[in-house]
Image: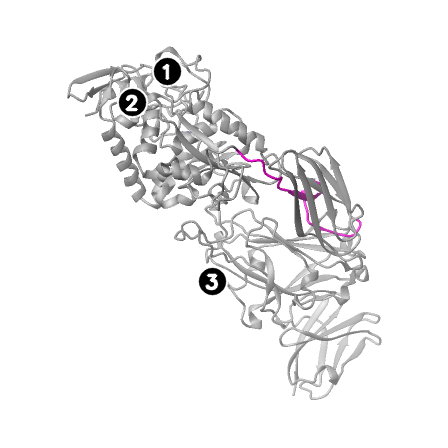
């Protein structure tokens, strides 16, 4: 029998008193996400309604003296509720690489807040008696889901730290057993509407989104004193104090409430700290019936609780009503499964009440060049290896590098968190790195990182001799591929090809199914990923003058047929200084990459006609004796900005360098005066080409599959050249393509051999 008595007068007040524009800071995105979930799955709204109804029913009686509801276990606020916590640091080795110590400090601070062990003297008089003590304690888990010892922290290097939001919520430990908190570099949801510090997932969304359950926070706000406490309030079912307004925090005229009686209605306070604000709260009281059916009136403060943890302005306190709501969720409800966290068996399984163990350090590092992460290098080029070892204070690290490192072993004494070694290599091939990290408390951990860095060969291959078919028993291993973020999407060998059933494939088709639930597929490569492969070193000095092209064949498709949604690109860059610096050669867009339209299944080319020739002109500046090329594929996002690409598989093959462009599939007539005679032939043939004296005529003969079978060149004299194609090159009956080029003119013709 809950009665609201405030509405009529409040509406008048709000319209009269509020003026000026509302300023929405959007510093917590919990509501936005919740609304999106409900849009996608309307049954979640009913779940939420039922939960709120059950709390209202449970709390329909109030002891007006203690201000506690009369339900027995809820009023017993002395029972301490212990919650196991797992903190997942999603990082790019930058400022988002939060230290273990910062996490320990966070947990200590959360415990002070939820145990009311902090200075509450600044709380204004009307609310002093409503300050609530939740008696909830947080503990970093000391056992992981497999029962192995842990300090409750995981780390992952991922591009998704740059706003991946729900997609970056990897490494979740079962949300039935751990309260998961993620940190990422920046919250992506904030991009459109201002800075977002963090967001939580409400308990009522658990059934549909258990694999996202928990809180995620932008790394800079771990130490701000209230962000995680606020989000944890949401995690325990608390709303923003202005929630029912449905409007953004601080929206003029939009008084809202939060299912909690001792937090008066408010429009919320996006900034500043207006301690007294009567806009929505004047004459605010509630009428309750006690357990005997007698009505009692409670006159709550006639000012809003701007200092409430669930407002934005100056988050200082939870109210007693909020504590009741949180504890009711934990002790009396299975909505969100929070009631499985604090059970004795779960506390034992997660080791939540045990002392955090001393564990050996976890060695970690990243390699960089000019402050950019780089794992491909050339002999003699120095890479910087930055130590990122964690889980214990490190007293020394011994690095061991294979492959002729000029500094094979380096001992760091008293290494700081940012300690590093510079290193260069003399031999080509993969480099294995061993880090022996000694901790202050726990001994030495020896960690091996195989295939961490690839060093190109010291000797470049003349460009004329390069014909990459990407066969596993041939050149594939000399074109190293990198999957920087240890996910499944990368360049790899494909057993189909333009000519020889081998090619380089980018696996853009992603059919992952969430491993936690198995029923909510996430298709598409997430936004922001990129994967590289690199070429062998190429000697392009033979092409110092004239034309020089990089030619290759491609075959690709998308999953979407909507042009706006196809935004994959591939950036081809080159380096002429041993992979120290890179220059963009070209960026291929969808028109270049995806020649086969849309396919809802994983795309595989089946016939030669599925492939198209691509030509990229090499500028004179790149035609040096030692050049390496980098191929970087970036999945785009659809035009709604969802975090998935609509790409499918993409294949590359037959990469070579030539004065002539690719395109033997297309019969180009051209203006050149060329004849191939006799045609058809069952013997040899001649290319008769007419052009200016001293011009060089180049001839390339390919079979119908595109395989180059013969090339030659000849200087024209007497304005005409007769260039022989020997019978030995034409032993198989069929159709051949003869491409003749002089200067800038090219002509391709068919030659029939019988
Ligand atoms: Zn919030």
Q: Nearer the viewer, mark 2 or mark 3?
A: 2
- Element class at badge 2: loop
Identify the mark at residue 261; answer none if there is no mark.
2
**Residue identifier under label 1:** 277
The crowd level at tag 2 (other Cα within 10 Å; few <14, some 14-19, many 20+) is some
Q: Quadrant of the N terminus?
A: top left
Tell me the distance, in whole angstroms, between the alpha carbons under discs 3 and 1: 59 Å
**Is the shortest distance between ligand 1 and the CB of mark 3 under 8 Å?**
no
- Element class at badge 3: loop
- On the image, the x and y values in percent for residue 126 come to 35, 12
> Start and end of the magenta stretch?
356-380
**Residue identifier under label 3:** 599
Residue at 47%, 25% (x, y): give it.
Answer: 226
306 up-or-down from 456: above or below? above
Q: Is residue 255 visible?
A: no
Left or right of residue 210: residue 482: right
- On the image, the x and y values in percent for residue 138 come to 45, 30
Q: Say which quarter of the image contains residue 588.
A: bottom right
């Amino acid at each position: 029998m809950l009665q609201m008595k405030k509405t009529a007068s409040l509406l008048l007040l709000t319209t009269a008193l509020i003026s000026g524009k509302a300023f929405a800071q959007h510093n917590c995105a919990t509501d936005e996400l919740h609304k999106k979930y409900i849009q996608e799955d309307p049954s979640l709204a009913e779940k939420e309604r039922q939960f709120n109804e059950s709390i209202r029913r449970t709390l329909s009686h109030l002891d007006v003296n203690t201000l506690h509801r009369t339900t027995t276990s809820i009023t017993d606020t002395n029972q301490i509720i212990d919650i196991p916590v797992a903190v997942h640091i999603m990082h790019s080795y930058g400022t988002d690489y939060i230290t273990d110590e910062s996490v320990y400090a966070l947990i200590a601070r959360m415990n002070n807040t939820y145990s009311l062990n902090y200075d509450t003297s600044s709380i204004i008089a009307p609310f002093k008696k409503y300050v609530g003590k939740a008696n909830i304690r947080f503990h970093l888990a000391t056992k992981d889901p497999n029962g192995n010892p842990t300090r409750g922290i995981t780390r992952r290097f991922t591009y998704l730290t740059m706003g991946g939001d729900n997609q970056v919520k990897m490494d979740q430990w079962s949300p039935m057993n751990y309260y998961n908190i993620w940190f990422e570099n920046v919250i992506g949801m904030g991009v459109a509407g201002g800075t977002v510090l963090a967001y939580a997932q409400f308990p009522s969304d658990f059934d549909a989104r258990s694999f996202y359950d928990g809180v995620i926070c932008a790394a800079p706000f771990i130490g701000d004193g209230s962000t995680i406490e606020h989000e944890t309030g949401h995690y325990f079912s608390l709303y923003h104090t202005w929630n029912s307004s449905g409007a953004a925090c601080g929206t003029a005229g939009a008084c809202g409430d939060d299912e909690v009686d001792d937090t008066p209605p408010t429009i919320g306070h996006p900034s500043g700290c207006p301690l007294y604000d009567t806009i929505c709260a004047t004459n605010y009281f509630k009428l309750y019936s006690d357990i005997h059916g007698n009505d009692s009136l409670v006159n709550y403060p006639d000012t809003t609780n701007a200092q409430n943890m669930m407002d934005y302005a100056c988050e200082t306190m939870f109210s007693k009503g909020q504590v009741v709501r949180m504890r009711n969720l934990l002790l009396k409800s299975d909505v969100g499964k929070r009631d499985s966290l604090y059970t004795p068996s779960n506390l034992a399984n997660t080791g939540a009440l045990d002392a955090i163990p001393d564990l050996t350090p976890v060695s970690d590092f990243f390699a960089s060049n000019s402050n950019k992460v780089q794992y491909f290098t050339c002999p003699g080029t120095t890479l910087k290896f930055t130590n990122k070892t964690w889980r214990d204070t490190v007293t020394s690290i011994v690095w061991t590098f294979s492959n002729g490192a000029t500094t094979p072993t380096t001992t760091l004494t008293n290494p700081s968190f940012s300690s590093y070694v510079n290193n260069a290599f003399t031999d080509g091939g993969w480099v294995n790195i061993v880090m022996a990290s000694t901790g202050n408390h726990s001994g030495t951990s020896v960690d091996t990182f195989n295939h961490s860095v690839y060093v190109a060969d010291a000797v470049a291959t003349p460009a004329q001799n390069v014909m990459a078919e990407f066969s596993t028993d041939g050149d594939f291993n000399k074109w190293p591929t990198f999957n920087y973020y240890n996910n499944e999407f990368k360049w790899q060998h494909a057993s189909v090809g333009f000519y020889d059933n081998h090619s380089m494939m980018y696996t853009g088709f992603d059919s992952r199914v969430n491993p936690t639930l198995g029923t909510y597929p996430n298709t598409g490569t997430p936004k922001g990923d990129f994967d590289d492969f690199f070429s062998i070193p190429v000697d392009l000095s033979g092409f110092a003058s004239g034309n020089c092209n990089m030619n290759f064949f491609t075959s690709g498709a998308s999953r979407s047929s909507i042009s706006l949604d196809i935004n994959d690109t591939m950036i081809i860059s080159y380096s002429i200084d041993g992979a120290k610096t890179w220059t963009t050669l070209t960026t291929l867009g969808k028109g270049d990459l995806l020649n086969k339209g849309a396919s809802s299944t994983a795309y595989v080319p089946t016939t030669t006609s599925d492939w198209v020739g691509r030509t990229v002109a090499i500028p004179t500046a790149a035609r040096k004796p030692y050049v390496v090329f980098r191929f970087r594929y970036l999945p785009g996002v659809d035009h709604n900005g969802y975090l998935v690409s609509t790409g499918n598989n993409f294949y590359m093959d037959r990469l070579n360098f030539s004065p002539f462009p690719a395109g033997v599939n297309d019969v180009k007539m051209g203006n050149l005066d060329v004849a191939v005679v006799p045609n058809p032939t069952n013997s040899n043939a001649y290319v008769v080409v007419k052009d200016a004296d001293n011009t060089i005529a180049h001839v390339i003969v390919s079979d119908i599959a595109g395989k180059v079978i013969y090339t030659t060149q000849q200087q024209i004299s007497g304005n005409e050249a007769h260039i022989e194609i020997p019978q030995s090159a034409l032993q198989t009956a069929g159709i051949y393509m003869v491409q003749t080029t002089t200067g800038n003119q090219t002509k391709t013709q068919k030659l029939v051999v019988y």
